[in-house]
Image (spheres, rainbow, N blue to C red):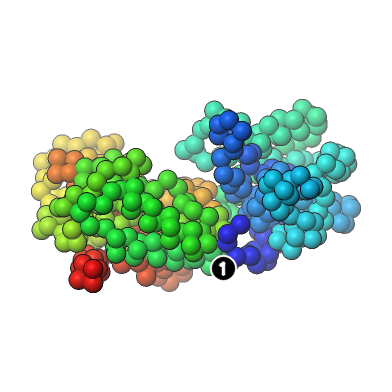
């Protein structure tokens, strides 16, 4: 791993939080992610299952974590199974955890080799009345590929049909929404690295550069600052490409007079940052571009102040829609007749602002959460309004990552320039120095 060692107190705290929510005399079993086949004899780069990482910090394939708070065997209340290395693995794949390293990383005191799991886990399951199994319950995701958690869960259900079975995800959703101090520190580091990458881009962008060259500048800064890499596929979209919400081809030349929309974020210690900025390729917004930019920025600032405890996220999105509606009227993109005649289920502002304003952020860029729960202190949300005008080849999106507190919302990206004047000044300074 490129990132610095993480304080194992984070994982001890997370296991204690999860254990408090478990039913009496139950056991919880968590599998690592699969190594996903790529092609030939290659695998895609391994990314640990977020839930297993949340509980242990063990960032290695073929790992299983087991929690059994009421276990009558005192030393088996928390255990982990890891793959046993050998000379062949060391030569071809490099170093793997020793038992002592796994203990130091996770704070789990009992570590076994994976080859011993069947016998040990069988005894523990027979001592329990119920079993928690894990799966991906992101309500906007469905995969045709069965995960390791699903496959192993099916095998366990078949082998122990008379146990009670419970879902681990509802507990994780409650836990993931509230970030601990340790997690905020890791997310702040991801944001700090993202800041460095954005400032590098401001020094680099000019007419004639390509979107993929901009992407290369970003990943260069990420890796040199110990990030895992991108937290998600980066969007580097100039001109009309900015009106494609999930544009990832990043293969067009940035032209004089275009605005370049960038949506990227570093992943540090598996925690995500999520940034959007829109900059003038030539270093100066046109009057129309500036008007649209300032409209988006006003919505962003107002939306940020709405992220306070007690607010319902669905109500929040409706209020942001009203703000955007007013800005679009001022930009003469819609008028009050359009609003009067609109379908309430599909408000007219959606023609130019199609997506939501905020989502939970954490170990995943679209982190676990319940949109029907009220906002609470400790949650981290993106704020990302945008205006997209295909007929003008113009798309503007701005996005920061916001920590909800009991006082004022705290911007984890407050060091990243967002005011139009600041961006123009930084780009102009680069031109003068070149």
Between 30 and 232, the one nearer to me in the picture: 232
Q: How many marks?
A: 1
Note whether residue 180 is visible. no
Q: Quadrant of residue 155?
A: top right
Taking the view exactly as shown, the residue that stands out farthest to the front is 91
Instruction: Return the residue at label 1.
Output: 181
Q: Secondary structure at mark 1?
A: helix
Residue at horizontal 57 percent and vertical 49 percent from the top:
173
Residue 43 x, y percent position in the rendering: 59, 38
Q: Is residue 99 left or right of residue 413?
A: right
Q: Quadrant of the N terminus?
A: bottom right
Residue visible at 19% across and 61% down? 283
Above-or-below relation of 294 to 155 = below
Pointer 1 local density, CA inside 10 Å: few below 14, some 14–19, many at least 20? few
**Residue shown at 25% from the left, 60% from the top:** 297
* Quarter of the rendering containing residue 124: top right
- Residue in the picture at 74% in, 63% down: 104
Left or right of 170 on screen, residue 400:
left
Instruction: Residue 299 in the image: state x and y as whole percent.
Output: 26, 58
Residue 23 vs 10, above or below: the answer is: above
- Viewer-nearest residue: 292 or 429: 429
Task: Tell me: 60 left or right of 270.
Answer: right
Figure quadrant of the C terminus:
bottom left
Which is nearer the eye, 327 or 260? Answer: 260
Q: Position of residue 343 (x, y in %)?
A: 23, 35
x, y (%) of residue 19?
72, 54
């Amino acid at each position: 791993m490129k990132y610095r060692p993480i304080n194992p107190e984070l994982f001890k705290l997370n296991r204690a939080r999860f254990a408090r929510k478990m039913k009496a005399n139950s056991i919880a079993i968590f599998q690592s992610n699969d190594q996903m086949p790529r092609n030939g004899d290659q695998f895609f780069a391994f990314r640990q299952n977020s839930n297993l990482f949340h509980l242990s910090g063990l960032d290695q394939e073929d790992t299983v974590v087991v929690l059994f708070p009421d276990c009558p065997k005192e030393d088996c209340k928390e255990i982990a199974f890891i793959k046993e290395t050998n000379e062949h693995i060391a030569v071809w794949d490099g170093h793997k955890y020793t038992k002592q390293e796994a203990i130091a990383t996770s704070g789990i005191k009992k570590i076994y080799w994976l080859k011993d799991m069947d016998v040990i886990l069988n005894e523990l399951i027979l001592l329990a009345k119920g079993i928690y199994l894990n799966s991906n319950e992101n309500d906007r995701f469905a995969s045709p590929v069965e995960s390791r958690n699903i496959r192993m869960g099916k095998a366990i259900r078949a082998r122990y049909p008379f146990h009670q079975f419970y879902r681990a995800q509802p507990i994780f959703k409650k836990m993931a929404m509230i970030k601990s101090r340790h997690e905020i520190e890791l997310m702040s580091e991801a944001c700090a690295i993202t800041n460095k990458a954005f400032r590098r881009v401001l020094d680099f962008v000019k007419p004639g550069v390509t979107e993929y060259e901009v992407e290369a500048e970003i990943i260069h800064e990420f890796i040199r600052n110990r990030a895992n890499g991108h937290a998600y596929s980066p969007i580097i979209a100039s001109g009309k490409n900015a009106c494609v919400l999930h544009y990832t081809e990043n293969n067009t030349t940035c032209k004089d007079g275009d605005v370049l929309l960038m949506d990227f974020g570093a992943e540090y210690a598996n925690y995500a940052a999520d940034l959007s900025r829109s900059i003038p390729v030539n270093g100066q917004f046109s009057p129309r571009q500036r008007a649209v930019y300032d409209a988006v920025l006003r919505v962003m600032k107002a939306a940020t102040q709405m992220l306070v405890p007690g607010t319902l996220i669905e109500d929040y999105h409706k209020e942001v829609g009203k703000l955007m509606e007013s800005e679009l009227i001022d930009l003469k993109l819609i008028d009050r007749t359009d609003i009067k005649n609109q379908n309430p289920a599909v408000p007219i502002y959606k023609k130019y602002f199609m997506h939501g304003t905020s989502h939970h952020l954490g170990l995943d860029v679209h982190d676990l959460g319940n949109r029907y729960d009220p906002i609470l202190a400790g949650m981290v949300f993106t704020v990302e309004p945008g205006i997209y005008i295909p007929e003008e080849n113009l798309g503007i999106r701005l996005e920061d990552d916001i920590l909800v507190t009991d006082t004022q919302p705290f911007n984890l990206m407050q060091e990243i320039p967002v005011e139009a004047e600041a961006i123009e000044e930084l780009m102009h300074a680069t031109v003068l120095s070149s």
